[in-house]
Amino acid sequence: MAFLKSNNTYRESAKKIANLSFAVGVYRPPSEGGSASLLLRITENCPWNKCTFCEMYKGETFVLRSVSDIKADIDAVKQISDEIAAVSIKMGHDGRITREVGSVLLQVEPSLYDNYCFITVFNWLASGGKTAFLQDANTVIMRPNELVEVLKYLRQTLKTLERVTSYARSKTLAQRQLEELKAIREAGLDRLHVGLESGNDEVLAVIRKGVTSAELIEGGRKAMEAGFQLSEYWMPGLAGMELWRQHAEDTARVLTAINPHYIRSRPFVPSPRTPIYEELAQGRLKVSSRHDRLEELRVTIEGLDVTSRVCFDHMMNSWRNRHGGLLFHQDYEGYKFPEEKSRVLELIQEGLAVGE
């Protein structure tokens, strides 16, 4: 009888969890820790959505979600968290989120196996409940006062959070007043991930990035001055064979002007579901070889005068060393510049020798 009673108690919590939901998107940066980060959809899709190299959000309409809907989602996360913790306490686990707690909930409510909201919150709690990533492509496009309200509510409701992160567009950062960005930072948004892609204006126009190199610099500098931890992403190989040197040199120039905390390499690989792939198929774009992209990378690295960490934390940074292993280590902290700049250049030379 005692077992059945406890099972029924667990079932009550499991049923409550099964009836709760919140909006979750697909995309986040790899450095945001996978299941360790809580994913919350603050906006839906991308407000620009014209970049020719990008397949994300294509065919989807951008939506600015209401503050009330976002708060309701945060409340749902809190309720799911509380029910999971309650089961843990009843099991004698003192609120700790263990595998046994998850097994019991799945046993009494099998529908939770396919409940992405439950899985997201459970994994987040099991990892300490410390980080959240706000989706989708450009959270800072929200009205600043509304984003501040959301961030304050998030921090007040989910008190274990230590870091909150989001994507942002340079154009939007450049358009925001510095005081607005400072208010957003002080409300609880800690880290921004920005797709720079290239520092060359001709390349930016060709890929329809919707931003100039001057705006890239202005947006990046504002983010830094406002106190955000900033990651900027660039794409070796994006300019193909014709503009590769201008792309490499101007990207180094723009990144040097911003001097972000992190610079992350995302080598260009054309996707069949993008406009740029059509240019490739029709012969209007000639993609550089792996060896050529590594030479381009050398020019960019040589031109960097930064105190950033330069990272190769993506599987497409797949150049090989003389032993057949990865040329660069792919952890999220990368190489500290300027101290390790010479080491990165040595590795590039090794990779170029392997490719010859």
Image (spheres, rainbow, N blue to C red):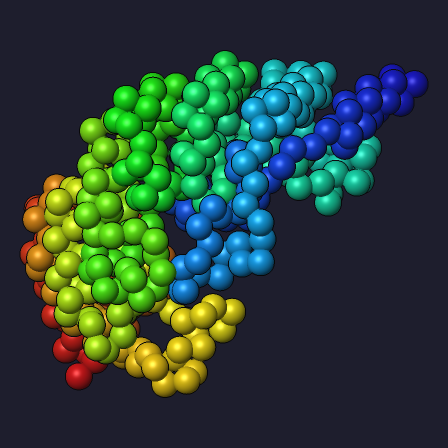
Please, is residue 98 above or below residue 49 in the view?
above
The image quadrant where one finds the N terminus is top right
Looking at the rendered structure, the number of numbered marks drawn on it comes to 0
Q: Position of residue 107 (x, y in %)?
A: 79, 36
Q: Position of residue 284 (x, y in %)?
A: 34, 82
The image quadrant where one finds the C terminus is bottom left
Identify which residue is drawn at 82% across, 22% down: 12
Please, is residue 289 above or below residue 246 in the view?
below
Outermost right residue? 1
Please, is residue 332 above or below residue 221 in the view?
below
Q: Position of residue 185 (x, y in %)?
A: 33, 24
Quarter of image, res 199: bottom left
Quarter of image, res 94: top right
- The answer to whether residue 286 shows anywhere in this view is yes
Please, is residue 173 above or below residue 196 in the view?
above
Q: Is residue 81 left or right of residue 29?
A: right
Q: Position of residue 191 (x, y in %)?
A: 34, 33
- Give whichever of 132, 179 is nearer the camera: 179
Q: Is residue 297 left or right of residue 147?
A: left
Identify which residue is drawn at 53% across, 58% down: 58
Identify which residue is drawn at 56% across, 41% down: 63
Q: Is residue 234 left or right of residue 269?
A: left
Identify which residue is drawn at 65% across, 33% down: 22
- The answer to whether residue 290 shows anywhere in this view is no
- Give whichever of 109, 7 is nearer the camera: 109
Quarter of image, res 139: top left
